[in-house]
Image (cartoon, rainbow, N blue to C red):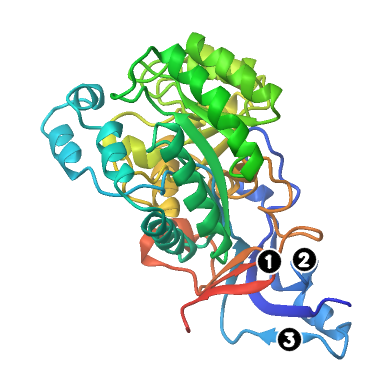
Amino acid sequence: MQKQIKLIGPFKQLVSLRGLPLNGPLHDNQLEIIENAGILIQGDYIIAIDNFNKLRKNLQSNAVQIVLKGDFVALPSYIDCHSHIAFDGDRSRDFAIRNSGGSYLEIAAGGGGIWSTVMQTRKCGLNKLTKLIHQRATVLLKQGITTIEVKSGYGLNIEQEIKLLRAITQANINSKIDLVSTCLAAHMLPHDYQGSNEDYLTEIANKLFPVLKAESLSNRIDAFIERSAFSAKQIRPYFQKAKSMGFELCVHADQFTTSGSALAVEMKALSADHLEASTEQEIKLLSKSSTVCVALPAASLGLGCGFTPARKLLDAGSILAIATDWNPGSAPMGKLLTSASILATMEKLSNAELFAGITFRAAKALNLSDRGRLDKGFLADFVIYKTDNYQLIPYLGDNISPSQVWKNGKLAYSTDK
């Protein structure tokens, strides 16, 4: 049975992002901006992007026409390639201590930090946790985000990590958008574990990894390489085990100290995330690899530290993505476009680099090649703003919101509903 065809438009401007490279710097004059544009969809996919009147003239008689009245701008919907929205509780106390001069590592040593969220999340039942993930995903959907990576990591034992990943899986089933689960059981050594870092990692690899495969809970393994968590030396065999079982890798790297990015490149990880502490040496290494550099500006704001050296990474030829890092400790903001716009201001990123970082380059960090651009053969995932100028979107930040968000050719959110 042939899937229904839909034509949506006209758009004052359609910013396709097609034809742009994965690597390196971008200039705004490289953006393809189609005026009076239409999007032709069949089922889940785009079958044409062109002048609206031209598409309308050749339209089949049984096709559905969705005609927009007024000025609108269309872009590929956004992809949040790094989030921690599977949690319960808050860390407002940590925030207050940091603002009074306490460091992230000092707070962690005093029983706050990640361990505080672990204790709160362990008490949270599966149904409530699923509901919390779904609620936060809906907040992101209303921002124009239709693909969200969601990490575990607040369980830190076999049973609790399985609970978190089952909650993410269940939330994905009930969601209008895509949730991509990542196992971050190597977030830190749990305080109640009786053994070494190496013992814990071995236990997770031997007992949890097979369950992930058996229940299809996640195909992605992440680890936090830092003084408060695990060393690169300790994580190497853990990642080797994961790769041998067919898992994809990503790394929390170079947030406070370096070494994580080097392991990410060595292990051919899909992404190295954070990179605030990366020096010229790490930038050069990353630029020669296919590992995506994921900047998390909201964490820099939350911690009061420097930003990922995004300008240097791009100029060196790296792939730069930008994500929310939404978590209860360092990045409770949960605002992708706002934090990306702040990074662009601080690091002098073009609009083209900003939008690429939250669309097709973010998709690369998740090993997804079917989204992030508006073009034939891509998923019909797009966001619509009631404006006549795409430049107003990063400029206004939270003062402009999507009028509609489409996922897989279906209306997932509208301000009219």
Cα–Cα span, label 1 and label 3: 17 Å
Q: Position of residue 113 (x, y in %)?
A: 26, 32
Mark number, residue 46 = 2
Circle 3 residue: 65
Q: Is mark 3 on a helix, strand or loop?
A: strand
Q: Which residue is drawn at 76% across and 79% down?
A: 6
**Which class describes the residues within 10 Å of circle 1: few (<14), some (14-19), or many (20+)?**
many
Mark 3 and mark 1 in contact (Cβ < 8 Å)? no
Whole-number angstrom distance, CA of label 2 to CA of label 1? 9 Å
**319 relative position to 160: left or right:** right
Asked if residue 169 is positioned above or below residue 70 in the image, the reply reads above
Residue matched to label 1 = 408
Q: Is residue 412 visible?
A: yes
Residue 239, position as x, y percentages in the image: 59, 20
| Left or right: where 190 falls relative to 241 | left
149 shown above or below 397: above
Q: What residue type is labelled 3?
A: Gln
Foreground residue among 368 and 150: 150
Of pointers 1 and 3, the one earlier in the residue sequence: 3
Q: Is residue 191 above or below residue 55?
A: above
